[in-house]
Amino acid sequence: MAKQCDFVEQCPIAEQFGQQDWDMMLKRYCRGEFRKCHRYQLRQQGNNVEQYLMPWDNITEIDSA
């Protein structure tokens, strides 16, 4: 099982945050519960993701079973 988001290295929202806030985002979403990130969910479904969409926008739970 992946331990971080496959898209973390090219995620454009990094530019939206200062270093301390970005570190928190990395811990919470990118290297934490990244399957709850709306950006990740859309990419996994093959959808385009708007550049400024935040991870918590329109979050839905995905059943891990």
Image (spheres, helix red, strand yellow):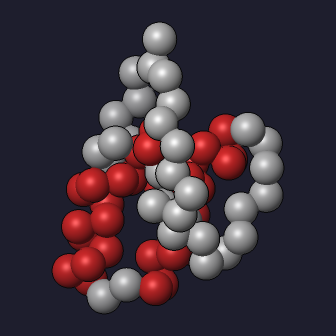
Q: Position of residue 48 (x, y in %)?
A: 79, 58
| Residue 9, visible in the rendered structure | no
In this rendered view, identify the residue nearer to me: 14 or 56.
Answer: 56
The residue most toward the right is 47
In this rendered view, identify the residue nearer to me: 26 or 53.
Answer: 53
Q: Residue at x 24, y 69 (%)?
A: 23
Image height of 1 relative to 31, above or below:
above
Image height of 12 relative to 57, above or below:
below
Q: Residue at x 37, y 84 (%)?
A: 17
Q: Which part of the image, by quadrant, shows the N terminus?
A: top left
| Residue 63, visible in the rendered structure | yes
Q: Residue at x 56, y 57 (%)?
A: 58
Q: Residue at x 51, y 30 (%)?
A: 62
Badge count: 0
Q: Is residue 15 left or right of residue 17?
A: right
Q: Is residue 47 left or right of residue 34?
A: right
Q: Position of residue 47 (x, y in %)?
A: 79, 49
Q: Position of residue 28 (x, y in %)?
A: 27, 55
Q: Position of residue 52 (x, y in %)?
A: 61, 78
